[in-house]
Every structure is written in structure tokens, then in C-alpha cells.
Amino acid sequence: MTFRAMAGSGMLSFATIVYSKDYPLLELQARSMARFLDPAEVASISIIMNEVDEPALRRNLSDILPYYGPLASHVRIVGGDDILLPANIRTSPRALERAYVDYRYRIPAVRRQGWRGNNGYRMQQALKLASARCAGSDRIVLLDAKNVFLRPLSESDFFSSDGKGRIQFLKPELVFHRNWLSQSLLAFVVGCDVDDVSETTTFVTPYPVKREVLLGVLDEIDNRFGSVQALFASKRRPSEFMLINACCIKHHGGPEADFEKAHPVNIGLWPEYDEAKVRAELNRLKDPEALSLGVHNRVVSQLGAAHLDHLLEALEDRGICTKSQARDVFQRIGAVARRQ
């Protein structure tokens, strides 16, 4: 695949990683982008497949393209090969490891659902970093299929005037956060440990980041591990966003060099939330400043009738879709889950 030339730095590129279990949710994201984004401010929208059966997923994604409305000309469906395999033109002592990762789909006993038969969760992180290779501009917003925008958007919602990603900062206190950061610091041989790091960026999407930052992370990975997919298929357990932080710490003194502290209102519905937490998150939909909503595919089947109706009404009130259109999306999510 040939990617279009880079647009001006004042335009946004969006990259969404999609796999077969959550692709119906992309319709809501597409509808929200069509409603709230000015096509003149968008350089590219990349739908990146993380799937062992790319042809089947591509057919399903093609049905969603019309929902991007005036943005449709900016959208392209990108195969994992298009952004992962170019790194493999390098020679590397890890050639056998790379061969196993890149051709795992040929081994039925170990084939998984993600790109070329690899673990989908791990490859999703590799593909987010590699999305820099298909971005149409210098300023990228990384997304998951579950992200739905809730109000009109502009570049200033995601980037400062000097190009820093505007994002929430967090202290590394949670166990999983500390583990991701520790593994990422070790992977890049950064001369500090977790207790030396006061804050990092958040680890959720939407995640605004400069293309040059992602390319720097990819270069570091390629030099040390041969390819980004080889790293995420290994026994190491960094995360994509903590690798970004580790690279910023190592080369720029910290994430503050490339990110600006901000507090966007991003609402999330996650499978581990109890009823009270779900209710609290749904109530945040009343906030007119709320930027986005994230609905995990497993949450849909867990929502009671009242909570589901609350969610459907919020999507309709925001002008993203009708209640019946949103209900249809959630029913298809349930059907996909049952098939798999």
C-alpha cells in the first residue's frame, strides 16, 4: 500500500486499531467523527486491522465506510502487513524469532486471532506504535474502536500550539501501571527505575502524540529487538504507552518535553466496573465538555435495561445516531461475541 504524502503540521491524523470482536463499534466512532470533525482539519483516518483473517474483516469494515460521511475520502483500511513488515528489511540476529512471529498463522497449534496469528492484545499495542508509518500528518490521535466522540472537535482539543499532545498525567501508583513502566524502562535500558519517575502520561485512548515521537520509539525497538512485533510477541511485558514514556525519559528528560498536562473528560465503561461505577460514568454523559466515551465490547452484554437506555439516549441527544441505530450496533456486538 502506498500512503499519501504528509500534510501540513496543523492537520490531524487518526488511527484506530480494529479486530473482529469489536468492529461493529466502529460504526459509532465513524458517525461521531462525521458529526464533530471538520474535514479541512483531517489529514487521514487509518483503520488498521489486527486480525488473522484480514479479508473477512476488510469486507465488514467496508460496510462501515459510508458512516464517515464527508470524511470518507480521508479514510483507508490498512492491513497489518503494510505497517509492520517494512521494518523487516533489516538484517538481525533475531531472524528466526521474527520468522516465527511473522508467519505464526501457518502453525495451527499456536495460531491466535491477532495479526498473522499472534496474540491480539499484544499486537494491538505494536500496531498503535507502527501507525506512525501510515499517518498523513505530524499530529496523530490513537484510538480504539470503542472510542466515540461526544462534541465538536478541533486540533486544540488534542495538541498545544507548539505540537505537544494534550493529555492527562498520572503518578505510577497502580500495580499494572508500575509493571508496564518498569518493563518499558528495562526494554530501553533507561538508567532509572519506576520510583525515579514522578509522572507519566495516561495509558488510555484517545492518545494524541507527535509522529516523530512514535518513529523514535520504533527506531529504538528495531535497533534492540529487530521489529516492534517481535518485542510484543516476546516474554517481555512493556506497554505501548509506557514505551513512549520510557523513550521520552531516555532522550528528552521526561514526557513533559512532548506532552502537555491536560484534563480532557473521557468517559469509560469497562467490564470490571461495578453497578455504582457504571452509573457514575453514565451520569458524566451530562457534562457538555465530555470529549469521548469508551465502551468496551464486553460491557454491552452486562448493561441492564435502564443503563442501556441511558446510554442510547445520550448518543441520540448528542446527535450521533438514533437510539435504534445504536441499539442495532450493540446487538451486532453481542452476535459477534456469541459466534466467537
Image (cartoon, helix red, strand yellow):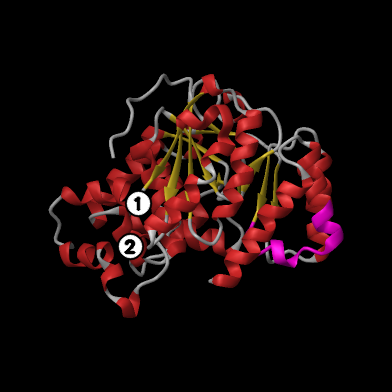
* Residue at the bottom extreme of this rendering: 109
Q: Is residue 317 above or below residue 243?
A: above
**Residue 297 lies in magenta, yes or no?**
yes
- Type of amino acid at the residue the image marks with label 1: Gly
For the point 49% across and 52% down, the residue is: 60
For the point 28% across and 35% down, the residue is: 2
Neighbour class for label 1 at 10 Å: few (<14), some, many (≥20)?
Answer: many
Q: What number is the disc on residue 267? A: none
Residue 150 visible to an observer of this rendering: yes
Which span is picked out in magenta?
296-309
Total marks shown come to 2
Please report contact status of discs 2 and 1: CB closer than 8 Å, yes or no. yes
Instruction: Give residue 321's position: percent from left, percent from top.
Output: 72, 40
Q: Which comes before the other along the chain, label 2 or label 1?
A: 1
Distance between the Cα atoms at labels 2 and 1? 8 Å
In the rendered image, which quarter contains the N terminus?
A: top left
Instruction: Give residue 5's position: percent from left, percent from top.
Output: 32, 25
Q: Is residue 283 left or right of residue 233?
A: right
Q: Mark 1 points at which residue?
A: 80
Q: Mark 2 points at which residue?
A: 116
- Type of amino acid at the residue the image marks with label 2: Arg
- Pick whichever, 205 or 177, lies toward us: 205
